[in-house]
Image (spheres, grey):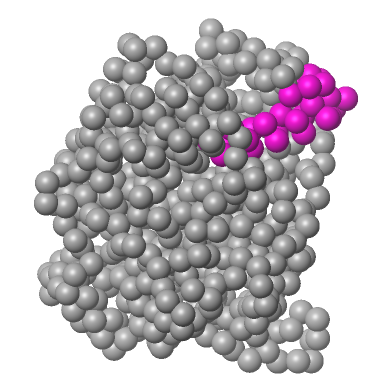
Amino acid sequence: MKAAALYSTAGSLLLTTLAAAPAGGAPGTPDAHGTAELHGTAVAVARARAAGIDFGPCSAADVPQAPAGVRCGTVSVPLDYAHPGGKQIRLTVSRIPATHKDPHNSKRKVPRQGALVYNPGGPGASGMYFPLIGTIREWKRIAAAYDLVGYAPRGVGRSAPLSCEDPKRFVKAPTTSPAHPSEAYKQQRIAQAKAYARGCAQRAGTALRFYNSLDNARDLDVLRAALGEDRLTFMGASYGTYLGALYGAMFPSHVRRMVLDSAVNPDPQKIWYRSNLDQSAAFEERWADFRDWIARHDDVYRLGATPAKVQHSYDTARERLARKAAGGKVGPGQLQNAFLTAGYYDDFWASRAAALSAYLHGDPGPLVRLAAPSPETAAEAENGRAVYTAVECNDAPWPTDWSVWDRDNTRLARVAPFETWDNAWMNLPCAYWPAPRQKPLDVRTGPGELPPVMVLAAERDAAAPYQGALEMTRRLAGSVLVTERDAGTHGIGGGPNKCVNGHLEAYLLEGRLPARHASCAPRPEPVASGGPAGKGDRREALKGRGRAR
């Protein structure tokens, strides 16, 4: 999933040793994109178009402290599209109308182009906050022409919420995070994975199997109809790009324009076991980028003037936290999670480096404030994890033999220790999943079947390695790739890169794509700030908190 030129030893090892990894599944794996589901979608679409969405004030549970212009409503979809007359679930939706205001010419009224629906990824992340992005300078031209529409996919938030365990247990801290776990630790994590999978089944019952990407794509078509749109203008980020690709393959005539930002690899062989292995290899490269940046700013952080010395400082902190948790809540697991987010967003580099420096120089406060789990967000975090697990486990077969997981992750961890085992533990419930697995759709479209799609990608994105964007572009005929070179932030559309935003606006506002794949220079590197007693980067508060693919 990462560009061939950027594959390190870790990536090469992954390609050569994991190609034949077996992926077991339950006998009789269902084909869940058959004629019954197609008919059920048509029934649900007709109902939704007739009913529309009754938008009103947003509740605090939907969009806390929502501005007056943001309105919320719900759309009903079948739990099981093969039985559209059966149980219905309600998805929450948020919208702010197009402003019609040209930010560069106050006298010009911008014509409305319809609704722009956004999915932030995950799976398990909510898009209910998306309409608020229209207040940001980089989005004002798009907000002038489009109603900005967000929604909570099935299972997320108040949209038939899914849960697999008590949220209090989910945020239990401190936790460990061994890069090379012992056999006893592995057995402990196997037991936890089995218990988690059982908890999902016990809490969701027979509905568990219906939290999957194909039903998410069908829900998107019902939402399109409920909004009164004949064709959908859609932007998906991270996992949202896979959702968008599925939608484009399943409903190509219903697409108006589509932006896939930080594209994941849609190859059925990658969904999702091998995709996660690719991701772990890529995070090692991004962790190396971060260490190199910290080393170049040793005058600020005093963590070491070489990447190796920075690694030593990080390992020292892990060892100290294993002996005594900072603030009683931050152990090696919380440290690793905080630094993992820096692998997603380089906006977080300064705050993480400053907190680590402060901790090693005697002040644990910044690290505790940064990394300690929050009881206030426990329910939301547990819900997001539950939906993530259900969708990925339901979408495709996974290896059911622990020896396969052990072999693949042990090999990979030798050259990519930063994220490999933690990623394995997060996904291990899929080895023991009680619901039937689906057969992934082979996403590909021929010339003229789907309107041209814009794919956005950062060359060093770890969460969605670059090879995935190349594969996505190959599979969607007529699509064009816009690359941010030598950059690794996950999600680049509407960010600080003016070149990327120029292509995004030209496409969404005028339907204009580059004649061939385009390349943009990278955004500026993060500014080193904070020092040993720093308070972190304030922009962190503006970022999404969900761990999105």
386 shown above or below 412 = below
Q: Which of these two is toward me, 274 or 192?
A: 274
Residue at (60, 10) in percent of width and height: 320
Q: Which quadrant of the view contains residue 46? A: bottom left
Residue found farthest to the front: 16
Q: How many marks?
A: 0
Residue at (49, 24) in percent of width and height: 413
Q: Assess whether residue 428 is covered by the magenta stretch.
A: no
Can residue 171 be seen here? The reply is no
Percent across and percent down for residue 314 are 65, 19
Q: Which of these two is toward me, 409 or 380?
A: 409
Percent across and percent down for residue 359 are 69, 18
Q: Main secondary structure of the magenta part?
A: helix
Apparent side of residue 502 relative to residue 337 in the rendered image (left or right): right
Residue found farthest to the right: 299
Q: Which of these two is toward me, 420 or 448?
A: 448
Percent across and percent down for residue 409 are 41, 27
- Which stretch appears magenta? 281-307
Can residue 419 be seen here? The reply is yes
Q: Which of these two is toward me, 497 or 379?
A: 497
Q: Assess whether residue 301 is covered by the magenta stretch.
A: yes
Q: Which quadrant of the view contains residue 426? A: top left
126 shown above or below 317 = below
Residue at (35, 50) in percent of width and height: 269
288 shown above or below 469 = above
Percent across and percent down for residue 373 are 50, 32
445 shown above or below 205 = below
Apparent side of residue 174 relative to residue 168 in the rendered image (left or right): right
Q: Which quadrant of the view contains residue 68? A: bottom right
Residue at (39, 29) in percent of width and height: 408
